[in-house]
Image: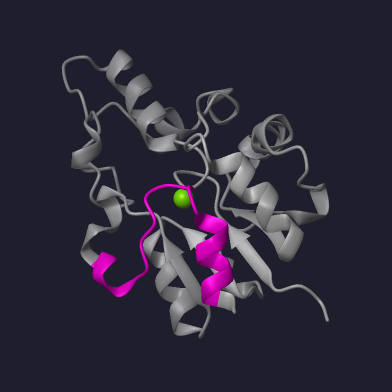
Amino acid sequence: MSKKIVAIDMDDTICHLIPKAIHYHNLLYPDLPLTMEQIVSFDLSGIWHPSCSENIFFGRPGLFEELEIFDEYTVEEIRRMTADFDVIIVTAARPASVPEKWNWLQKHLPFIPFENFFVAKRKYLLDFDLLIDDGPHNLIAAKQAGKHTIMIPRPWNAQVQEDFILKDSWDGMTELVRTILA
Ligand SMILES: [Mg+2]
């Protein structure tokens, strides 16, 4: 029997994108510093500096390669998960950031083969059994399609957290996935 498929998001699920993007925004625009708590949706255009743009905020060369790992448990938990499940990484990436994201994966999770690296903004088109993600749009679509989900709680998904199983740390993630998919 083939293994069940666990899809794992990258940004703000296994690495910290928004804190780093905020850091660079605030260096560029010290007169309008942003905080994590302000990021209550994926549309940041109303809160970043008027001179900022999608390309400035997320398009900084090298940004995705320097992101910090989510926590001290992330690597071992994902490694453990690969023994029982077909673990795929699914990330909505700007085309220019794809090599950076792949480099990041090779550095931190070198046991993930490239055939398990999916660049997809419309994650609902993919077939998987369980999705670990922070994006409410991805999680809601997965749930509506009858798939299992685990939400990484972040300020931008606070509105829908009560509808999902939450996990704020990777500590014990494999066990939780095993329980859900048993
Ligand atoms: Mg994400």
Q: Position of residue 117 (x, y in %)?
A: 72, 51
* Residue sitting nearer the eye, 112 or 96: 112
Q: How is the image coloured?
A: one colour
Compared to residue 124, the image places residue 52 above or below, namely: above
Left or right: residue 109 versus residue 23 is right
Q: Residue at x 70, y 74 (%)?
A: 4
Q: Residue at x 21, y 31 (%)?
A: 35
Q: Position of residue 59 (x, y in %)?
A: 50, 31
Q: Position of residue 29 (x, y in %)?
A: 25, 17
Q: Quadrant of the N terminus?
A: bottom right
Q: Residue at x 51, y 76 (%)?
A: 148
Left or right: residue 166 versus residue 32 is right
Tell me which corner region of the image, top left, top right, bottom left or bottom right, holds residue 159: bottom left
Q: Residue at x 56, y 52 (%)?
A: 92
Specify whether residue 30 is in view.
yes
Which portion, as a residue range, is magenta?
Answer: 160-180
Left or right: residue 111 versus residue 62 is right
Compared to residue 142, the image places residue 91 above or below, namely: above
